Image: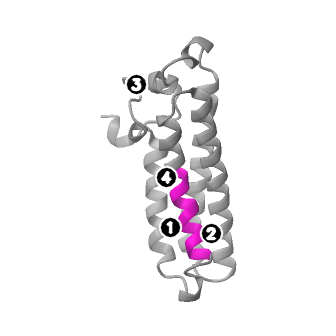
Amino acid sequence: MGTVKSFRDLAVWNQEMDLAEKVYRLTARFPKEERFGLTAQARRAALSVPSNIAEGHARESTKEYLRGLSIAQASLAELQTQLELAGRLQYATQAELSPLLELATSLSRQLYALRNALRRLPSEAKRGQMAATSVPNSQLPTLNPREQS
């Protein structure tokens, strides 16, 4: 299976990118008066998740990587709240929102799993170069299905 050499090798990052794309497409249909409100906030939160995964992965220590993943986790919770509000305001139907909220819940679990895997690394692996680049795939939640073949 190899090692994770880039944030692009992480299933959670790829799925977060898919979620962000779906959020952008959904919010394009929100009322124009929400352009600087809920639309902008949801898009910012959706983009923040994969961005913080990527930024954390690029940092020089596991501690900084964990911080990036923690910020991504918080942004994901923020996005879930905004999607719930969009439903309450009837900007989107439950049929549109349910798959996004289910994906967000799954991704939240994956982020926790990745954080826990990084915390379990031996202390010597946490020193020096970016330890997360040497985490075996078997210790990560899942690989991107495109990368598994």
Read off the residue under disc 2: 83
Q: Is residue 108 left or right of residue 6?
A: right
**Picture disc at residue 121:** none
> What color scheme is it?
one colour
Q: Secondary structure at mark 2?
A: helix
Image quadrant holding the C terminus, namely top left
Query: Which mark is first along the chain, 2 or 1?
Result: 1
Q: Which mark is residue 23?
A: 1
Upstream in sequence: badge 4 or badge 2? 4
User: What's the CA distance linking mark 4 and mark 3?
Assistant: 20 Å
- Residue range corresponding to the magenta coloring: 38-50
Marks 2 and 1: in contact by CB < 8 Å? yes
Work out how far the residue at label 1 is from the one at label 2, CA to CA, in angstroms.
9 Å
Residue 52 inside the magenta-drawn segment? no
Q: Which residue is the site of mark 4?
A: 16
Which amino acid type is marked by label 3? Thr
Q: Nearer the viewer, residue 50 or 139?
A: 50
The residue under the point 44% across, 72% down is 25
- Among the two numbered marks 2 and 3 on one chain, the one whose residue lies closer to the N terminus: 3
Say if the magenta span includes residue 43: yes
